[in-house]
Amino acid sequence: MKREQQLRVQPGSAVTANDALAPVHARAQLVAAVVLSLAVSLLFFATTSHGIGILPDSVAYMRIGSARHFAPLYTWLLQFTALAQIELVAAAWWLNWFLYVVNTVLILRLLLLAQLTPIWSALGTALIVGHPVFVEFHSVAMTEPLFIALTLASVLVFLRAMQDNRVASVALVGAILGLAMLTRFAAAPLLPAFAILRLLAGGGGLTRRLVDCAVMTGACGAVFGSWLIASELTSGDSTGRSLELLGDTDLAYWIRTAGALSTMLLPSAAGPVIRLLFLAFASVVVVFITVNYAFAWLRLSSAQRARPHALVPIVFSLFSILYLLFLILSVMIQYRLTLTGRFLLPLYVFLALAVMTPFGASRPDLARHRKLGIVLVGLAAVIGASNLVRTTVFTVATYESGQGYAHKIWSTSPVLASASKLPASAVIYSNAPDVIEFRLRRSAAYIPRRFNHLSGRDEASMPFAQQMDAMRRRLAEGDAYVVFIYGVDWRDYLVSENDLLNSVPLVEQETLADGRIYRSATRATEMQVLP
């Protein structure tokens, strides 16, 4: 009851919708935004001193390789820059810097809208944007920064839509969610979250609320569905995944996943027992805060629920729940999907906002929540210290060496140096064609796949046996090479080097410290008979 009374707006202090969304402590907010933007910019410059980080998926996003099973918006943005004659890697660098600053400002803005003080808002923002995984994925050419930006932007527009009651605003929310889904398919659960909240809060009767939900869904479907249909019609593929339960999760898998979740809060050096205990304790605190706030929110009138400072905590609590359910469903559908940092990062952002924003929603007197406040500050201090140490280590390491395929080790790779000297007309097969295409800027193809890494099954369009036959025929034509790069050792779905040698006529051309190059036996025979 006390919490409900705190959430209620006193009659003498009632504010209009525009007042509720107006800048809070404008000067302090501006200072905080500038300082935080400069800080994250310095982090970004340090972690990309060797260029934007390039991961295997980054190459696919740039359409340098052959993979096409990713959501396309990030790729479209990079390709759009080609019209301005900007090289793709440079475009990714500029885009990620922009998104890092934008995400920082958006997080700060949401905390301020929840009526946290500028100092607490700045500290809360730092706790999120200074997380090592947040820093890492803003320093590599990946979709996470764009996905987070669109998600946060959709929340701000939704808060506005709940105040102005305009159909156009609701449609804009749906359109932004459609763009988020075109960035990461994982944005799908955000739409039902907004629909649930629209049914529970805001003006209008049930019919009007249902209309708003329909408009939001229609706008989202128009944006995402148009691409989905066009992709299926033109290429016969869109998401690259079938709606089948292909996951192979067991108890050991979920234990590893819990371990991965715990490393989002504490470093691996803390040990599994301490990390898991800390994760369990933090989870209890999160559930206690969000559940108590949700019950108090539900006791408010529909109009009061829709006020930005009251609605923000509920938005991110619901996001957290539905996103987590989506992750669980994903690991049941996709073959061998591991919930790494890139999947857990949005959950960390959502949960952090869900836990921090209730303490500003009604400007509570901390004396009434002294024990809970101490616990929460203590948790934040431990996580903040962990973030500081790990982000520092990560920043120093990437500043010195780079990351991914932009790491300086690839600049001195003997096998890449040798592969660069192969005839320009030669066909190259490799276990790491993406490395060759990115580093050497020349075409290469994958060696045959034993199975599809998304389904665990043989490729339906071109089974493994057909891939092997096609490779044999091309090798028989001569002027073809196979390059094995030992630094890329995680693709167990490809045929192994030994199995390939036992199945395909190859002659070893060169053995190097980090790989081996073979040429077709036909080419070797031709060279032997030359005078």
Image (tube, rainbow, N blue to C red):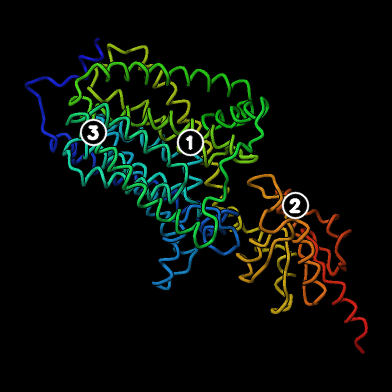
In the image, which is nearer the foreground, mark 1 or mark 3? 3
Q: Residues within 10 Å of mark 1 (few under 14, many from 20)?
A: some
Q: Is residue 343 left or right of residue 316?
A: right
Q: Which residue is at a point 21% across and 39% down the rendered structure image?
A: 160
Image quadrant for the C terminus? Answer: bottom right
Image quadrant for the N terminus? Answer: top left
Which residue appears farthest toward the left when viewing the image?
Answer: 12
Q: Position of residue 44 (x, y in %)?
A: 45, 51
Contact, mark 1 vs mark 2 (Cβ under 8 Å): no
Among the two numbered marks 3 and 2 on one chain, the one whose residue lies closer to the N terminus? 3
Q: How many angstroms separate mark 1 from mark 3 (CA)?
A: 45 Å
Q: Which residue is at a point 55% across and 44% down the rendered structure image?
A: 394
Tell which of 389 and 439 is nearer to you: 439
Q: Is residue 320 left or right of residue 58?
A: left
Q: Position of residue 214 (x, y in %)?
A: 29, 40
Contact, mark 1 vs mark 3 (Cβ under 8 Å): no
Q: Residues within 10 Å of mark 2 (few under 14, many from 20)?
A: many
Residue named by callout 3: 209
Amino acid carrying mark 3 in the image: Arg
Q: Position of residue 443 (x, y in %)?
A: 64, 70
Q: Secondary structure at mark 2?
A: loop
* Residue 452: numbered disc: none
Amino acid carrying mark 2 in the image: Arg
Residue named by callout 2: 450
Among the two numbered marks 1 and 2 on one chain, the one whose residue lies closer to the N terminus? 1
| Vertical arrangement, residue 57 with respect to residue 116, above or below | below
* Residue 388: numbered disc: 1
| Vertical arrangement, residue 259 with respect to residue 125, above or below | above
